[in-house]
Amino acid sequence: MRAVTAPGPTRVIASWEYRNAVRARWVLTMAAVFGLLCVAVTLLAFRTVRELGLTGIGPASATLVNLGVLLPSLMGLLLGAGSLAGSREQGMLAMICAQPLRRSQVAAGAFLGLTGSLWTTLGIGFGCAMLIMAGVARGSDVPAIVTLIGATFGVAAASVAIGVAISAVVSSRVQAISLAVGLWIVLSLGVDLALAALAPSVHLGPAGLLGAILLNPLEAGRILALLGTNFQGTALGPFGAYLIATFGKVGTVGVLVADLAAWTVAPLLVARWALPRKDL
Amino acid sequence: MPETPFLEVVGLTKVYRGGWGLHDVSLTLPSGTIAALGGPNGSGKSTFLRCVAGLARSKGEVRLDGELLGTAPGPRAAIGYLPQSVTMPEASTIGEVLDFFSALRRADRRDLPLPEGFVRPDHDRIGELSGGQRHRVALAVALLGHPKLLLLDEPVANLDEEGRAAFWRMLRRLRDDEGVTSVVSSPSPSELRGVADRAIHLDDGRLHREEDLTAPADVTDIAPHPDTDADLEACS
């Protein structure tokens, strides 16, 4: 008979964070908004598809890409940023860290629990959209759906990790939330605007193009999500077109997945380094 | 025969940006001691407890039963810590909070050394509790897993008279029956007269003086606290 072992601290904290996150009113509100938006854009896309005499779910899933990158990344950053910094202000982090565990386990548990809660939210939102899509989806649409969901989940995980790192480094919840919102604005809008402004005068070159993608997890996620829906199209933009031309489709998927993984692991290493150095 | 120190603090020093938090504090406590940690506001009582619990970075050494307390989690299983204030998730139930910390300590919460009814029933939500009732939950968390050293930052601040009496009674029973050592901070350590064996006074982050409260001559300058004396009479 297998011995039953007690769950480790990381798992215990992950389950605690998950439960608290899915109960939070603002998370529930964001989940409802995400679900409604998913349904709305899917229905609108299908109406357009019918009017144009097209078939399949391609246009609908393409409309979900930006939604799947922008809203989950904001939610992930906010969830992560509020986690450790909020607990520290409430005294809960001191009580948790006074237990026989390592602080790196606290950061890892917070990341896992919050990512799980965000993935649940996204799963419900996409699930609603998929129910609508199911009537018209074809077998060839499956890769597009899988790519879209995978990319969205990857961006969500990276965003939570970045948020947790911010939360571990700064000294107050307000600072953490402000930084997270500022970073989201920069990543979702600021980088594109800056590049557009600089484009006439600055020639980025191959290294610049690659850097602009890899340094922005939202852009990496967007291109990854679009790969399944519009591989040949112009929707990939100059960065996506450059990646495809340089690495091919499979290579591009590998580069982007590795980039999102790095954007998840690196912030967690920062949190692991910073949290033990914080006074609680 | 000299007392074997259970808690040994050597040169504990904590510097904040604004000045000293603790300045070269050294003390020893034998096993089974209740120490009242006193001093004015800002004297370093909470900082001392946080540094000993390993929650704030500091210079110096803290040994527990001869073992150096570092970053390793193992020795911390022997410590129960109560912060001065804590806000638990309002949507959680008392049972969930206690289950969570029990799982982290790998402790059985049915073994809590608290009297029946000290903490409200498991299904009550934290958000529905008064400040004092929430404080009782935090106290229960600090006592999970039979810690050998209790670091309690103003543990009775939010408790009513009945709660205080039950708490002091429990603290003395843990000392007498299980040899638990407790360091209990209070802005008015006279409140701990009759409970504490030793008084430690901090002032401006320095160890101002230590008193053995079990020796009659050493307690004369500590004013009796009417509420506590009444509580203790009720306990005995």
Image: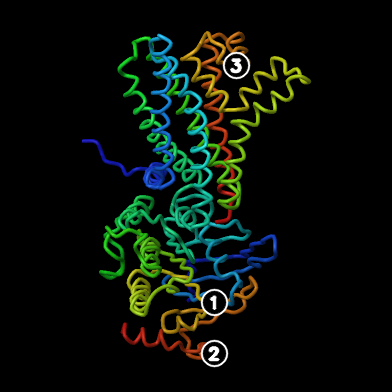
* Subunit of label 3: A
Residue B111 location, quadrant: bottom left
Instruction: Determine the residue located farthest toward the right in the rendered image.
Output: A201
Looking at the image, which is closer to me, B106 or B40?
B40
Left or right for B12, reference B155: right
Instruction: Residue B157 in the image: state x and y as whole percent.
Output: 45, 74
State the residue position of label 3.
A237
Which of labels 3 and 2 is toward the front? Answer: 3
State the residue position of label 2.
B221
1 or 2: tag closer to the N-terminus? 1
Give, as a three-letter code, the residue at label 3.
Answer: Gly
**Label 3 and label 2 in one chain:** no
Instruction: Residue A113 in the image: state x and y as whole percent.
Output: 41, 40
Answer yes or no: do the residues labelled 3 and 2 have beta carbons within 8 Å? no
Which of labels 1 and 3 is toward the front? Answer: 3
Residue at 48% x, 23% y is A65
Give, as a three-letter code, the residue at label 2.
Answer: Asp
Residue B61 location, quadrant: bottom right
Q: CA distance from mark 3 to mark 2?
A: 80 Å
